[in-house]
Image: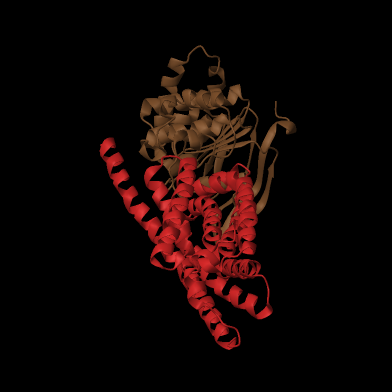
Amino acid sequence: MFDDFFIRALFAGIGVAFVTGPLGCFVVWRRLSYFGDTLAHSALLGVTIAFSLEFNIALSVFISSSVIALFLIQLQKKTNLPGDALLGLLAHSSLAVGLVAIGFLSFIRFDIMGLLFGDILAVNVNDLLIIWIGGAFILLVLKLIWKPLFASTVNYELAEAEGLNPDRAKAIFTLLMAAIIAISIKMIGLLLITGMLIIPAAFARNISDSPKGMVIFSIIGGLLSVFIGLFSSLNFNTPSGPSIIMAALILFIISLFKIKQSIKLKN
Amino acid sequence: MRTEENILVKLKNAGIKQNDKWLVKGVSLEVEKGKIVTLIGPNGSGKSTTAKIALGIYKEFEGTVEKFTNKIGYVPQKISIDWTLPLRVADFMVLTDDLNKGDINEALALTGVDHLIDKNLGNLSGGEFQRVLLARAISRKPELLVLDEPVQGVDFTGEIALYQLIKKISEKLNCGILLISHDLHTVMSATDHVVCLNGHVCCSGSPIDVAKDKEYKALFGEQASQTLSIYEHKHDHVHSDDGDIKQKN
């Protein structure tokens, strides 16, 4: 059944959407979209390391993104620069370092477009296993830290005062972000992963009125985007990542009509 | 009554220094089970900071804090829920704890907002929101309640009713309450001990003693302590047979 590349891509996409749905909600709630971008850009470095050392790509990306996240936390403590400047600094310099490193590895053939924008042809059975097992693990951990993470998203001091240890939840969440980027990079591409996190969540926000509802709609939005995106990618021979993100954008635009209605009702 | 086992939280010479400036310093106080300690003082006098030290929100501070309970309910002074987070009252009530429906409804009914349970938090008025915050804090049946200006934005009659409710809760749950307020006269009937702050402890004691203290008068003006005595008089009148009075003269 997994012999067909399209079926493989479809199952990979479904696995990714189940994880990006809930994580994406937190990215939107906690205003971490630029942070997600930074981690994703640093993934290129992880990919080059994986190629040059013949190491597993997902694991390598996970490690490099986690290191960048830790580095960011250190920078925030040491400097007085605002957070977005630090994020920009890390995002672009790690992208640059990754591209320079690729230049040095001229003996390996790189599909840069595939790395940046995703390539459904590249998804093999091994990747599927990583997505589904890794994804299940991410969701399980997210469920375990849900309470402190969510409470501190609403109000950090409340969570801290009532003994929920929000700092630990935040650190674990950062690792989960690195993990989702690691497992979805082949599918969506590193320039567009944050889109897969944010756009379905934004779509969900427009049509839901509770946190759990938003998570469920975010997963549904992600799944629909994967289906529509992959089918059009197959039909029109477009790259998979941008097609999925475009499908998500169309869903988001449709969801805008729904908020207009509900605002009208309230007045 | 004053036994060591009853102490829930104890601050000794606590203070916080930020960029070589003391936000608040040398605060010593203790909250016991069933007692209400009120922190008063002008804006920027370190009331909220003191409460946050007691709660363990600040990790680096001077002095010592001993906490003897982990069941804490907290009403922060400021909390803003932005639009990106769809949050109903029902979701907010279970923010830090899993509660059953009965407990949630009971707490909301006590503060008079049980009809709002399905409303979005962003659509509540200031006063309604304060009542929900208070309901959430008490619904966990805490041993220590820390209330930072819990009735801001609540209308005057509601304010008095809520303070009476807070008093009732402290008796019913036998919990200690650390209350922050900027006006002594509305909280005084409920308070056992008052600490008047202005970057440091100006004076402390029973509400009457504090109102008569010249440092308190210097901070809040002669007017304030007169208002207080007028109010106190009114108060004696209303509750003339609840047995509390002999304590107050």
Describe residue B220's horizontal placement relative to residue A103 as left or right. Answer: left
x and y percentages locating residue A171 in the rendered image: 61, 57
Quarter holding the C terminus of chain A is top left
Above or below residue B108? Residue A235 is below
Q: Nearer the viewer, residue B110 or B116?
A: B116
Q: Residue at x 44, y 29 (%)?
A: B117
Describe residue A121's horizontal placement relative to residue B2 as left or right. Answer: left
Q: Residue at x 55, y 41 (%)?
A: B203
The figure's colour scheme reads by chain
Q: Nearer the viewer, residue B246 or B29?
A: B29
Describe residue A21's horizontal placement relative to residue B142 as left or right. Answer: left
The brown-coloured chain is labelled: B
Quarter holding the N terminus of chain A is bottom right
x and y percentages locating residue B54 in the rendered image: 61, 44
Look at the image and tell me whether residue B51 can be seen: no
Q: Residue at x 38, y 65 (%)?
A: A236
x and y percentages locating residue A121 in the rendered image: 53, 68
The red-coloured chain is labelled: A
x and y percentages locating residue B161 in the rendered image: 44, 24
Q: Nearer the viewer, residue B116 or A209?
A: A209
Q: Quadrant of residue A176?
A: bottom right
Counting every numbered tag in the picture gives: 0
Look at the image and tell me whether residue A56 can be seen: yes
Q: Nearer the viewer, residue B246 or B4?
A: B4
Above or below residue B110? Residue B11 is below
